[in-house]
Amino acid sequence: MPDRTPYIAANWKMHKTVAEAAEFVDALLPRIAATQADVVICPSFLALHEVVERRRGTAVRVAAQNMHAEQSGAFTGEVSAPMLVELDVEAVVLGHSERRQLFAETDEALALKVPAALAADLEPILCVGETEQARDGGETETVLERQLQADLANVEPGDLEKVVVAYEPIWAIGTGRTATPEQAQEACAFIRDVLRARGGAADAVRILYGGSVKPANAAELLALPDVDGALVGGASLDAGDFAAIVEAAG
Ligand code: PEP
């Protein structure tokens, strides 16, 4: 099995002004200087440039939180892959549950966005996850498989290892409720099986867990065999807490 470099991403959602983003990066960088993990910050569009410039010369990478599949056009309020690449952004979160639930993001749109990101050399961080109702109804695997098959429909098997997948059970996002280690491992192993069945190098794909990850539970979750990192929301807003999670990844 290939070694998978741990991957820890900070999803700031609609938090932090440009000035606050700058302050965070300055506080974070000295705290994570020794890490071997891939560390990614996902600020708002407006703070991307500031974060890209502040982290120059370090291994910290920067991701947008969404993008449109088209390169340009009459899509008011949207941002395209070439616009992100021009800023030296390296990755993009796609299909976050807040986009799916609050902004009507569809699997059809994601089937276009994921290959558009890959074509632009942006690393897609594709989020999948079930609602509480689906979990209680024993539908978790059905939901995950449906999302993965639809969202990756236009990705060649040879490109699969360039995608990062985040397993984010919706009932655990921003709620303080975390999946148990058994639930996280089971879902991430299932995701890897679905990727394997698609014919890609599934053992090379980084699969993250997201849902109320914090310094107190990070080490246990990150030690799971199929959990290769974390997508962190609330606890990524504090440089000390986020640094502690990065440290737990090694
Ligand atoms: C997220 O925003 O993807 C997330 C997992 O949030 P939180 O860590 O706050 O649950």
Image (cartoon, grey):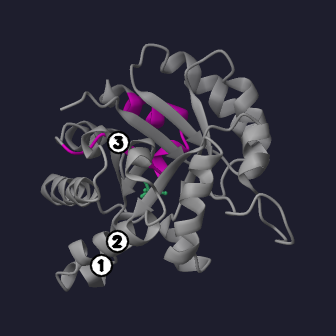
What type is the residue that disc 3 sits on?
A: Arg
* Label 1 element class: helix
Is the residue under label 2 in contact with that under label 1 (CB below 8 Å)? yes
User: Which label is found at residue 132?
Assistant: 1
Which sits earlier in the primary sequence, circle 3 or circle 2?
Answer: 2
User: Which label is found at residue 203?
Assistant: none
Q: Is mark 2 within 8 Å of ligand 1?
A: no
Residue sitting nearer the eye, 88 or 250: 88
Which sits earlier in the primary sequence, circle 1 or circle 2?
Answer: 1
Residue 109, image x and y in percent?
Answer: 58, 73
Q: Which residues are magenta?
A: 226-246
What type is the residue that disc 1 sits on?
A: Glu
Residue 76, image x and y in percent?
Answer: 85, 71
* Label 3 element class: loop
Q: Is mark 1 within 8 Å of ligand 1?
A: no
Q: Is residue 175 left or right of residue 87?
A: left
Residue 242, image x and y in percent?
Answer: 46, 36
User: Which label is found at residue 171?
Assistant: 2
